[in-house]
Image: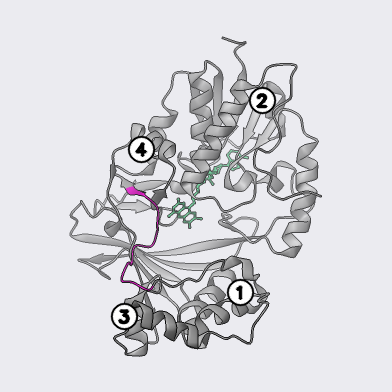
Amino acid sequence: MPRIEKIAVVGAGLSGAVIGRELAKAGHEVDVFETRNHIAGNCHTERDAATGVMVHVYGPHIFHTDDKDVWDYVNVFQNFLPYKNRVKTTSSGQVYSLPINLHTINQFFGKVFRPDEARAFIDSCSDKSISDPKTFEDQALRFVGKDLYDAFFKGYTQKQWGCSPAELPASILKRLPVRFNYDDNYFFHKYQGMPEHGYTEMIGRILDHTNITVHLETRFDSGLRKSFDHIFYSGPLDGYFEYEYGRLGYRTLDFERFTYEGDYQGCAVMNYGDVAVPHTRVTEHKHFSPWEDHAGSVCYREFSRACGPDDIPYYPIRLIKEKQQLGQYVRRALQEASVTFVGRLGTYRYLDMDVTIREALDTARLYLSTRPGETPMPAFLHPPLQMP
Ligand SMILES: Cc1cc2nc3c(=O)[nH]c(=O)nc-3n(C[C@H](O)[C@H](O)[C@H](O)COP(=O)(O)OP(=O)(O)OC[C@H]3O[C@@H](n4cnc5c(N)ncnc54)[C@H](O)[C@@H]3O)c2cc1C
């Protein structure tokens, strides 16, 4: 066993918990710092005392992956029960199924198309005058045409990102977002499910190791850096440098919580595509645990807006201005010794949970295989930008 090192892990979300666990298992002394009064980061779940419903406190989290190692890993710490995400959307007074599938197309256009007929029809709707789509709007119009774009993409995207889809890059919509069958399972992944007792219990078990000490309500600041051999930092990249080059742009979410006696909407997620409706979606949390039975219900109306200094950063914006700023922070981070930036905030990327775990495992393994005096641990395993 090599020398026991003192490791600081900043953030008790999935990134911090998995890295902390792997290093603790190898014998290192791990201190996990978390500003919030709970572990699990944005995956935090909590049972509502009045109804007994398991609430996804920072918005709905559905586990889906093709990565067998990651699936096996999470199943060690929690029993996963089957859950398929089936999303509905309300648009101009009608309820449709998402992602756009054969049912959506037939309902929307009042048709009874079979798959090949629907494919030919959508092709005939697509705007072929757009040969080189530069924006999200161009790309959507080229794929599905104006009617489906207006009903299912335009308003929702505008509310989600706070700008016209004509100002967003085409890269957001990479593939044709339509299915020509009746499959309404939102994700394609082989393994999908929900942790039986919630994500917080799962992450609590990951952190439950004799070599790990968790410090809740403790912000990790520059004064603590010298006390550790290495730091794994899953807090905001710009925050580590005291926002020296300004704040990286994020969208934040507001959740308007309400309760209901019975079943409010009959499904877990109902999107609202119309711009006239200010919220993007309503989530009804008891439907994320379909194996449970609760008379009462807890719902969130979700609103998206620009993130201010005191808000929780949710989605990195990553447009031209943010990429320039990000480049400055990445260059700065590459000069730091003994710190590795990880996770969604540390690398300023949107990361699903399975990718977060995969990257955390890879980070810990690389660290454990790095010998003193040889190549130092990099600032990023997954650079937030391709640097020139
Ligand atoms: C609305 C929403 C829905 C999502 N839904 C899904 C989904 O359905 N499926 C899916 O796979 N993924 C989903 N995700 C992604 C998922 O939330 C992330 O993969 C996961 O949270 C990343 O974990 P993390 O540890 O990197 O970051 P976080 O969970 O953000 O954890 C970072 C932690 O660091 C703490 N921290 C920050 N700075 C400091 C500091 N200086 N000192 C101490 N602590 C600090 C923060 O308080 C936070 O708890 C969703 C994300 C969002 C925003």
Residue type, numbered disc 4: Glu
Q: Nearer the viewer, residue 173 or 248?
A: 173
Residue 227 shown left or right of residue 57 in the figure: right
Residue 129 in the image: x percent, y percent? 63, 87
Mark 3 = which residue? 114
Identified at 22% across, 67% down, the residue is: 263
Q: What residue lies at 57% left-to-right and 86% top-to-bottom?
A: 127
**Some atom of ligand 1 lies within 8 Å of the CB belonging to the residue at label 4:** no
From the viewer's side, name the closer residue of 155 and 39. 155
What kind of residue is marked 2? His
Q: Is residue 184 magenta?
A: yes
Query: Magenta part of the protein: which range?
Result: 180-193
> Pointer 1: what residue?
136
| 225 displayed left or right of 362 | right
Residue 29 drawn above or below residue 348: above
Upstream in sequence: badge 2 or badge 1: 1
Name the kind of residue labelled 3 in the image: Arg
Contact between marks 4 and 2 (CB within 8 A): the answer is: no
> Which label lies toward us, 2 or 3?
3
Callout 1 secondary element: helix
Q: Which residue is mark 4?
A: 201
Q: Secondary structure at mark 3?
A: loop
Q: Which mark is residue 230?
A: 2
